[in-house]
Amino acid sequence: AQKVTQTQTSISVVEKTTVTMDCVYETRDSSYFLFWYKQTASGEIVFLIRQDSYKKENATVGHYSLNFQKPKSSIGLIITATQIEDSAVYFCAMRENSNNRIFFGDGTQLVVKP
Amino acid sequence: EAAVTQSPRNKVTVTGGNVTLSCRQTNSHNYMYWYRQDTGHGLRLIHYSYGAGNLQIGDVPDGYKATRTTQEDFFLLLELASPSQTSLYFCASSDRGSDYTFGSGTRLLVI
């Protein structure tokens, strides 16, 4: 069964606006970790931001923030003041505390236009 | 700077050929992973390892072997390459509970 689902295949926004990418996950663990990664056009995959399941406060790093809705098993990524260089594929991922592998969603392609 | 280095960056081989993809990490991480990425499938886990000499089977292991010779080095072996194994391969490392550090990827073409 798919453990991490990103329903948005592609999103297009205008530069300097805010975008939200959706992600829902499935787990029976009471403790887990949620991640967002960015894959650039060159293929490089970089870690962006993380939310631990026991933390109530939404994580924020630079112009990335998360909307963690635990009852809905949802972890949205919010990018404010988007820039052209934010154009990339964004992967949502989850790691359960009971094991050390990360499950990835299929990714959302973000295009930021001038 | 801690890193994950994959080699080669690109590889072309013929059907039935032998291929070894190499991955070295300088993060002192215990865990290492091999993924393949294909359009429409995202990142799929092939094999992973908890430490030198350890091997765990991932979600798409058929046609692949892997070996973790040291804490730093993790190899992916395709002994009879097939066109269906044409893909972009990523290696990653992590500590328990932490995020992954990815290598730059190896693009493999099997003709």
Image (cartoon, grey):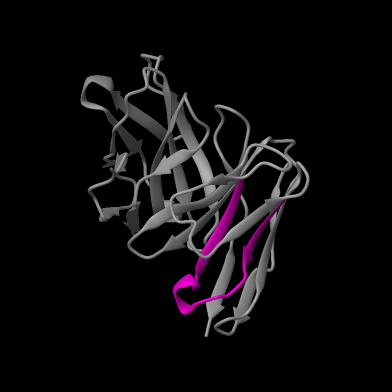
Count of picture labels: 0
Asked which quadrant contains residue B105, the reply is bottom right
Asked which quadrant contains residue A32, the reply is top left
Instruction: State left or right for residue A54 relative to residue B107.
Output: left
- Residue B63 x, y percent position in the rendering: 52, 65
Instruction: State left or right for residue B101 relative to residue A57.
Output: right
- Residue A108 x, y percent position in the rendering: 32, 52
- Residue A65 x, y percent position in the rendering: 39, 31
Does residue A65 show up magenta in the picture? no
Instruction: State left or right for residue A4 relative to residue B53.
Output: left
Vertical relation: A86 (above or below) B39: above
Q: Which image quarter holds the N terminus of chain B? A: top right
Q: What's the residue at 29%, 32% (across, down)?
A: A26
Vertical relation: B100 (above or below) A31: below
Question: Is residue A87 at all visible to an observer of this figure?
Answer: no
Vertical relation: B32 (above or below) B18: above
Does residue B83 show up magenta in the picture? yes
Question: Is residue B79 at all visible to an observer of this figure?
Answer: yes
Q: What range is drawn magenta here? A: B74-92
Q: What's the residue at 44%, 74% (across, down)?
A: B84
- Residue B27 x, y percent position in the rendering: 72, 39
Asked which quadrant contains residue A103, the reply is top left
Vertical relation: A62 (above or below) A71: below
Frontmost residue, A101 versus B27: A101
